[in-house]
Amino acid sequence: MEFFKDITITIDEADFKDHGRLMKVLQSHSPKKNGSCYQVRGSYEELENLSIELSAVRGRFIPSRHAQISHQYEQASTPVKSVNVNAVVMLYIEQRCAEQLNKICGNTFSIETQPGLGAVHNNPSSTVQVTFKPQHSSILPVRADFVRQQFITLYQRTASDLQVTSVSVSPRDHKDLQRRFPLLLLSPRHNRHEVTVTGPFVYIVKLKEFLLQNIKSSSMCPSKSLADTPNSTAGPSHSNNPEEESCPICMEPILPMKKKTLQCKHSFCRDCLTQAFDHKPVCPTCGKLYGILKGTQPVGGKMRVTRNSSSLPGYENYGTIIIHYDIPSGIQKEEHPNPGQPYEGASRTAYLPDSPDGRSILILLRQAFDQRLIFTVGRSTTSGRNNIVTWNDIHHKTSTHGGPTHFGYPDPDYLSRVRDELTVKGIE
């Protein structure tokens, strides 16, 4: 499951006694020096092979890139940074994306969340800290960074299409609905006749259509329950033809004359795909982007850029780019959570190093702003307030100091991470 075209690792020359051999290994990877450290960018395979070469320079042997990493270094590896994420999204990932999560962690890492996810639906705006626990006392730094970045990509792709809603359902029909819609997460509320539904937009639409059809059917036959309803809308069909292909959206057999296959080789009913693309032009199966992604950032906002000569920690040779965002208050549109209600605007300031990489990221952020992807309207994860302009999954540094835990610098991986976040949205 390869999400990233490339990642970045940092190599400290202080860890190597023979600087000549170190530079001989690094020279073919176009390293960028920052203080006593070198940053190397490449694919996971390239960087893992590099780590093997570097281990040899340090006098340690690694048997092969395919071998399980269980050997010991003389010093512990750099701890893997924790990630703060929305608790509702994390709960969905743990319960509905377990296979993808297991592929990311393998036998090398386990994932822990603090606090626990038991009371998520009582506070949907809450956040949890995800910590990556190595199963061995020392792990290759490139492997640790790769696991973390893969998780971030899985989280972003899941969160960008996830919706939470409530539906009225009889308790006796709860299990049947969960069986019919396995990709939705149904959680009973205090009101026994309501459930909270979490899942991808297209499947929530299908659920609501199914319930509406059932209401109409029940009005003609009051004794009928969901269990009596054929799987005509959402349930997988059990065909006698083992080669018959089912649509991943409606779960029905795809009629040959209505089949649409994307470049990523995933196939759907043409009408189902059209409906999904009306919401978001990405493959519902793998997330590949088709066309230009447009967000729900309120119109009328401004992005202004200034510069000064002071430097950011970790970028002492460069000045600072200062981004000023201003989104005025207004009335929510149909694309927002509460159409017709007012929303509160926001003014935000963010910082980038005025380096070649920083200037490149600035251009991409401008494109994301023009595509209305930087902000959205919703509930603030920090204050818990609703109907307010909030960030929308493209992370910014809002402080010049304090490191990652305070949304500031130094953070040597930040530019690489935000570039990857933008790439997921088709901006590169």
Image (tube, rainbow, N blue to C red):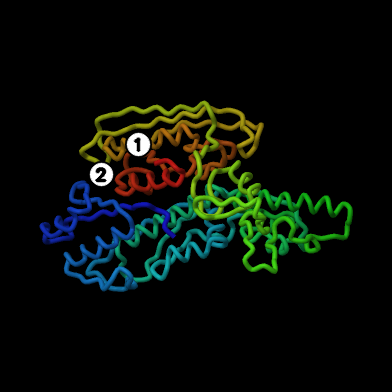
Pick the residue in front: 169 or 281. 281
**Which corner quadrant of the image does residue 305 belong to?**
top left
The residue shown at (37%, 56%) is 81
| In this view, 299 is above or below 394 | above
Residue 74 in picture, x, y percent from top left: 22, 69
Q: Is residue 334 left or right of residue 346?
A: right
> Identity of the amino acid at label 2?
Gly
Residue 3 in picture, x, y percent from top left: 42, 54
| In this view, 153 is above or below 346 | below
Q: How many marks?
A: 2
Residue at mark 2: 314
Q: Residue furthest front?
A: 257
Residue 404 in picture, x, y percent from top left: 36, 48
Residue at mark 1: 351
SS class, disc 1: strand
> Identity of the amino acid at label 1?
Tyr
Q: CA distance from mark 1 to mark 2?
A: 13 Å
Residue 180 in picture, x, y percent from top left: 69, 61
* Quarter of the image where the C terminus is located: top left
The residue shown at (33%, 53%) is 7
* Quarter of the image where the N terminus is located: bottom left
SS class, disc 2: loop
Q: Is residue 371 left or right of residue 60?
A: right
Q: Is residue 367 left or right of residue 390?
A: left
Mark 1 or mark 2: whose residue is earlier in sequence: 2
Label of residue 390 in the image: none
Tell me if mark 1 has few (under 14), some (14-19) or many (20+) residues whose alpha carbon lies within 10 angstroms of its own.
Answer: many
Asked if the residues shown at circle 1 and circle 2 are in contact, with their CB atoms under 8 angstroms apart, the answer is no
The residue shown at (24%, 30%) is 309
Tell me if mark 2 has few (under 14), some (14-19) or many (20+) residues whose alpha carbon lies within 10 angstroms of its own.
Answer: some
